[in-house]
Image (spheres, rainbow, N blue to C red):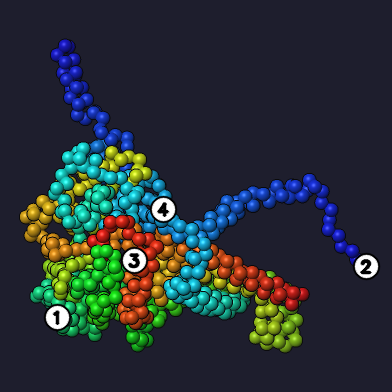
Amino acid sequence: MKKFLGIVLILLLIAAVTGFAQKKFAGKSIRLLYFAATYAEAAKEYSKEFEEKTGCKVEVVEFPYLTLYEKMGLSLSTGDSSYDIVTPACQWDGEFEPFMDDLAPLIKRDKFDSEDIIPGLWEQSGKWAGKIMGIPFSNTPQTLAYRTDLIKEMPKNWDDFFKLCDKLNNPAKNFYALAIPGVKEQFSGLWMMVQWSLGGRWADQNWNLTINSAETRKSLEIAKKWMKYADPAAPAWGLPESDAAFLAGNAAIAFSWPTLSIAPNGDNPEKSKVVGKWAVAPIPYEKNGVTVLSSWDMGIPKAAKNKDAAWEWIKFYTSKEKQLANFLKYSILPSRISVWQKPEVKSNKLYPHYQASQQGAVIWWRIPAGTMAEAYVRDAVSNYITDQWNLAKAIKFMEDGFKKLLADYPPAKGVKNTGR
Amino acid sequence: MLVTRTPYRSKTDRNLSWLFVLPVILILLVAAFIPLGWGAWLSLFRYKLNLPAARAFIGLKNYLDIFTDELTMLSLRNNVIFASLSVSVELVVGVTVAMMLSDDSKLFRGLISVLMIPMIIAPVVSGTLWRMMADRTYGVVNYLLSFLGIAPVSWIGDPKLALYTVTFVDTWQYIPFVAVLVLSSIKALPTSFLDAARVDGASPWKVFWRIILPIISPVIIIVAMIRFIDAFKVFDTIFVMTQGGPGNATEMLPTYIYRQGIKFLNIGYSSATAIVFVISMSLIAWAFSRLRDRQLRRLG
């Protein structure tokens, strides 16, 4: 009997230490605000594992890019405590920083392996005026997807690019050289890439406007010329339609964010007619080659209710293990140097993104007026390429708009223009 | 001489009347006037929600900016074209359909419920459907037109056509609304008028033009007012079909106000535009009411 009681006691002790032990965040729950894309899909998949590990329930709330900014902006600026974690795109950092916690004390406390995060990337995504407001978890320079059976090598300049387009374009057979998302929210980013590649900027480091330049004029002309090689429906297309045209085999080159749709679906015979016949490449290099950066970071709002549990999720989601899984399963490009060095990443079709980001990727103005400045670009570029405005009017519209914004909402003292 | 008198109401009666009206006044105050007043107050500031420190009182500058803001003026122009065109077509076709359906045959009675379908679909859904159907390359509209030998048309990708395409969708959706309201007023007409006219040898066109139309005109004016204000407030159809593009070819005031206020958190300027919008709509409603009153007086 004594022996039996002894065994029961030992078993109870083991159970208390392991299974029955109270998990660190048992009974708690966190709500995360994500971009409705692969990032949210991955988060949803990992939420069960996180709950098993910590006891904390996870609710992922997701919105498409076009509405995410307003949802996040309204929530943060009104002190709403609905979200324990938000995931701003890097271009929104300057606007949302006042409403976000500084993560530096948590990084120091938990010895978070921050030296593994690509330093240049973190400066553009997650850090603002010396404050760490987020940890970057995705690093995507905008690239091209192209048909490897039709194109041997992507041209290095725009003249050669158009010569190639001339050869490939065949509207009579409903085949176009380019698949372009022409809605202004998407198209403006494409124009920015070209302006950068030619060496143009919106303003210099000290915010003196440089938008009225030969590079701006040439880049607008190039962007307009693209439309000659695209499906005439393109001005009304968003990314889904544009990517679908490429995957359906109706275009040779897609101006896209290949990681969002082309990479996850390109080699799936149920969803693609270009299986094994596509690759990604940076845009023609010209002078700068710099592309648009899409990077997302995650941080904790000042008004969040469960900050410790939220930090636990950030460590979990941005860990090396999860970044590798994100890359292999969801085509989410890592923000950690060590993950890029893994053999399975180096041999992947998406590896050229790393080269593109090494060439340099930047986003537009990260100051609070940045989103409005980008809106001036959207309107000007879109009206120009659809023949509603002429070149001079489009450039003047951007210049006047920028002037007004910088006068009404000047950047804080000492903040330099590290973007466009 | 006949002397009319206002019936005597005791003080208790008057107090009771106020008591009954009080809940409505309170609800209006909370739901409409306080937000409107707050909006009017905000419109006097340069105020971006995510930059509370940069908030500054600028008086009427936001209102003056409206008239120099090219995109506000462009949105207004688009809005006027959209509302005028859609309401005109809806009225003409809606009244015609109502006249056809006023016949009590079984076929037409069945048709009413079919015709109601566009009206009961949420504009977000119908906008999404039309966006897909109107796609130049993959849409069913061009596919069907190809049987008639018509080359593909970029309905929402061509800035010259996009405004008319979204106007068409709105018209398609709300013709049943006009038709049903006009039909109910036609049904309510005393048949003796119509019978007498027919006995006197009036043609169907004359019966419609000289008798039916004048009598139902106050209803048509009210329907026109409701639809005009509604069309001016269009948002969902535009948002899902074109997002205001290509360029700003289909940008409307409500989408522009939304863009300024909710997307850019530029609350001061968007409040000023919204206040101007509310005042303009109130004036339009007032003008329609005057027109209706005049019409009623003419009818005796």
Task: Select label 4 or label 1 by which is in front.
Answer: 4
**Residue A34, percent across and down?**
30, 53
Q: Secondary structure at mark 2?
A: loop
What is the three-letter code of the residue carrying label 3? Ala
Chain hosting mark 3: A
**Residue A370, percent across and down?**
32, 62
What is the three-letter code of the residue carrying label 2? Met
What is the three-letter code of the residue carrying label 4? Pro
Per the image, the residue denoted by label 2 is B1
Which mark, by number, is residue A160?
Answer: 1
Q: Report the Cα–Cα distance between label 2 and label 4.
A: 70 Å
Which mark, by number, is residue B52?
Answer: 4
Q: Report the Cα–Cα distance between label 4 and label 1.
A: 49 Å
Q: Report the Cα–Cα distance between label 1 and label 2.
A: 98 Å
Quick one: which residue is furthest to the top in this view? Answer: A2
Disc 4 crowd, CA 10 A, few/some/many (<14, 14-19, 20+): few
Lower position in the chain sequence, tag 2 or tag 4: 2
Lower position in the chain sequence, tag 3 or tag 1: 1
Q: Report the Cα–Cα distance between label 3 and label 1.
A: 32 Å
Which one is nearer the viewer's eye here, B80 or B187? B80
B227 is higher (above) or lower (below) than A30: below
Disc 3 crowd, CA 10 A, few/some/many (<14, 14-19, 20+): many
